[in-house]
Image (cartoon, rainbow, N blue to C red):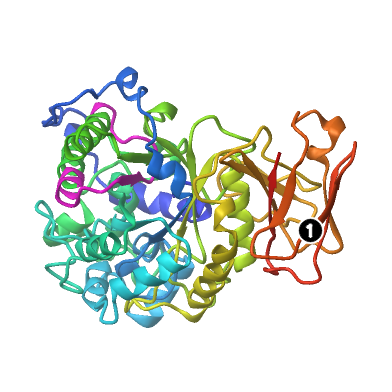
Amino acid sequence: MPNRRAALLALAAPMLALHLPLHAADAEQAPAQLTTVPGPFRADAGSLKTYQAPAWFRDAKFGIWSHWGPQSVPRAGDWYARNMYVYGSDQYKHHLAKYGHPSKFGYKDIIPLWKAEKFDPEALMALYKKAGARYFVSMGVHHDNFDLWDSRYHEWNAVKMGPRRDIVGDWRKAALKAGLRFGVSEHLGASYGWFATSHGYDQIWPMLGVAYDGADPKYESLYHRPHNQPYRNSASWYTTDKRFQQEWFNRITDLVTRYQPDLLYTDGGIPFGAVGRTLIANFYNASIANHGGKLEAVYDHKDIGSGEFIREAGVQDVERGVMEGINPLPWQTDTSIGDWFYSEGYKYKTTTEVVHMLADIVSKNGNLLLNVVQYPDGSLPPEPQQFLKEMAAWMDVNSDAIYGTRPWKIFGEGPTKAAAGHFQENTAYTAQDIRFTTKDGALYAITLGTPTGAVRIQSLGRKAGLEPRPVKAVTLLGSATPLRWEQGDDALTIQLPATLPSAISSSFRISF
């Protein structure tokens, strides 16, 4: 999430500049040693642009993500491992009050506190499936440089410490048992610069100049070696250090080889040039080999942060935002029902907000990947539990307007214009805002609110010119009551029954 907490970087910059030595050799190392998987894809943009998203992803529309790990333990929100070392930040103050000074009690000491003692992946997956998820994504490794699997190349992992179990493997078993597609997310690429704050120190007395625990060479494998390439802004999201690029390649290759996910999410652009492109080509070629010659893999990446963005090479991911209109290629929004990691007092999205986002995204040829926040112990807070219950009820009625659909000629109509781009997700819709999807020759019209009296769809007026065929029938999903409707020159007007199947949103199936 490269654009987050820009103000904190201003606090961190002088500390990093003072403390981190320059290693001239950082940019002079040999290129990474890259193994390749045989197949049609090569590690160049032209080859990767031949990619086409598989049907399962285009049909699934809705996935749930577990953005969960040791950073949940302090209950103080996202980017804790970095910001606990940013003097004066809220998370630094939280850490000081709860655990002590980061020179004595650092992130390495948070990790053993993550026990995941109530983590029941099968029970959670049953809830996620009932709520409508067709794919599930496990965190593989966040920027905190802690692997959630039995990592072959990294001692700081969840099997050797913390919960002492294979979190990725357990999620995978549960997802496949429930019939969901399985994915993993990797945020490792940015860790090298992101975690540089751990090598700093306080800016005032009484601890001025006392190095944080990240500067201790004993813990270099967690906090990274001293370097002069800290994360300051999106342009410095990825390092030029070839040694770390090799480490990234080895660890993420281990992750996707061992668990064979159908989806791999990178938190940024494609990392490290040819290194990242090679990993993607290998990921695709392995998928083809493992699925009898059929490509089933999806690679998500973003057009923000450093790194390459090759739109056609995979699926474009938009963080906490949406596209302006129908994108010709499939894409995905990733967002969270709350903070990315559990945070006390954080305001959660309502089910209404999530449903309206989902309908808007699907109408524009996208998918929604939603993080469902977990407590440090692996159980769910009451707000996500309530959301899953309400989402299941809405999907039980309206899923036919979502799954397996494709965009219509326009994505929708109505008075509200949604802001487009990353970190633009707080649009307040009305019942007059309507989104369209199509499937099997029918058109679905989804209201982004609770209509009263009648629904007018101007795009289906005879004079609108969008649909040459006259309307033949109109039904309300979840209702057996016959509807009265009239297709006039200006609009298709649908008279509503006395009661609606859902108070969140209504879906009409229109045949011609």
- Label 1 crowd (10 A; few <14 / some 14-19 / many >=20): some
Image quadrant where one finds the C terminus: top right
Q: Is residue 370 magenta?
A: no
Q: Is residue 245 visible?
A: yes
Check the image and report above or below for 487 versus 466: below
Compared across the picture, whether 247 is left or right of 129 comes to left
Check the image and report above or below for 323 versus 225: above
Secondary structure at badge 1 equals loop
The answer to which of 492 and 503 lies nearer the viewer is 492
* Residue span colored magenta: 252-274
Compared across the picture, whether 71 is left or right of 169 comes to right
Q: x, y percentage for residue 483?
A: 79, 58
Compared across the picture, whether 253 is left or right of 481 comes to left
Check the image and report above or below for 235 versus 212: above
Res 499 → quadrant: bottom right
Res 54 → quadrant: top left
**Residue assigned mark 1:** 483
